[in-house]
Structure formats: structure tokens, C-alpha cells
Amino acid sequence: MPRTHRRPQRRPSHLARRGGALVLTAALLCGCGGSADDWSKPHAKPTAVGALGAGFVAADGTPAPESTITPRPGSWDRVRPEKGYRVVLLRFGDDAPTRTVADAVTQWADEVDASLKTVTVAKPVEVLERIGDALALKPDLIISAGNHLVDPLALVTANHLDQQFLVVGAEVAEPTGNVTAADWTGASFRGEGLGLPSAYDPASFTPERAGRAVRAGVAAVLEGVTGVVLRID
């Protein structure tokens, strides 16, 4: 009988094994494993889960554009986005207030299972480019952290009215209807032209206060209360 020659199995080459490891490592580093992180797929317009409580806005209706309102504490607690809400955290600065706001955004995103991507501005000359990067992602909401973003956002946001922005811990002077701010006494920087307010206090940026501002601000955006400043106690 003729002998059957079995072809020996070839072991993966060193380069193939190494390449597979590199691909796996890259996937772990970029955090791209979940389907919620794939923003290339069609995405329905997000809706709010829950509703604002009494006292978030005055009983006589929607606040006027550019006005400042003081929601009743906790009136936003029942509002959250649907799972997979796409948010870009746009941050500039490594000072303690900026870190506190950025951490609050990250913690909130974990709590509500939002899909969060971060765009970091490393130096002033690239701020407009990084804002462009955030816009190119077409998120449901861009949340900014850092006083140095206020003036550039004042220039950019009016040209992108279909994109919602939330400024936490600061304000944009004369905001358009797509820009909402959530701050508090001690955190109301409005741009270099106006300087720091006399009541500005970096110590007022506590994790608890920043967390309340993020939740209240997102609730306002989801419910269409935009183009205003929320003053959070």
C-alpha cells in the first residue's frame, strides 16, 4: 500500500505571534472592545430617561435665553440618558479644578453607562484643532473642563448650532442656544476679557459639587433647557 505522507503543521512564525500580541495590546490600550465605543454605526437621537422634578425651572415656563437659573437641589436626579449616550470630554489644563471636573464627568459616564471619549488639549496653539477633533466625532454632547476653553468655545460654538455643548465650572458669555453652563459661586469664569470674578475660588471645585453640576447640566440638555446658565448650590 502506498504510504500517506502527513504534512507537518506549521507553527506560527515569531513575527505572526508578535503581531497578534501587538494587536491585542493596542485594543486594550485604546479601550475599543465594547460595541458602545464604535461610533461609526448609525445612532438614534438620544432621549431622556425620567423627567425633571419640580423646581428645576420656574413654574411660568422655559427660561429666557442666556438667563441664569437656580434649579432646586435634586430636581435633576431622576433624569439620565439612555445607555450608549455619546459624550466627548474636552479638557484643557492640569490644574486641580480642571481635574476635578474631568473626574466628575468620567464618574458620571460610568454610572449611567454612557460612551465616553476624551479629547485633551496639550498646548494653546492646538486648542482649535482639538475642538475640531471633538466636533468630528459627532457626539450627542461635548462637555468642556478647563477655563482655558471658554474663549475658544465662544468663537466656535455659534458656528455649530447642531452640536450641544455643556460647560462645567465656567460660562460662555452670550451663549447660543446650543451652549449650556453649570457652575456655582466660586466657579463662574467667563473669559479673559472679563477676567476672574472676585468670588472665584479653586477650593470650591469639590468632587461632590462638580458631580452635581454634571448631572444637572446633562439633565438640562436632555430636556431641552439649553442656552442658559445653571447655578448649582
Image (tube, grey):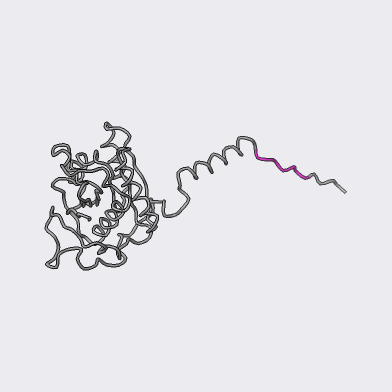
Principal secondary structure, stretch drawn in magenta: loop
Q: Residue at x 31, y 41 (%)?
A: 96
Q: Tell which residue pokes out farthest to the right in this image.
A: 1
Q: Nearer the viewer, residue 40 or 37?
A: 37
Q: Which residue is drawn at 21% across and 51% down?
A: 184
Residue 78: image location, x then y, percent: 30, 65
Residue 175: image location, x then y, percent: 16, 48
Residue 181 counted in the magenta span:
no
Q: In which quarter of the image is the C terminus?
A: bottom left
Region of the chain picked out in magenta, as a range: 6-12
Q: How many labels does the image show?
A: 0
Q: Which of 1 and 148 is in front in this view?
A: 148
Q: Residue at x 80, y 44 (%)?
A: 5
Q: Residue at x 28, y 44 (%)?
A: 145
Residue 7: image location, x then y, percent: 75, 43
- Horizontal side of 146 relative to 62 (left or right) equals right
Q: Which of the 4 image quarters holds residue 200?
A: top left
Vertical order, 182 against 22 (above or below):
below
Residue 120: image location, x then y, percent: 34, 39
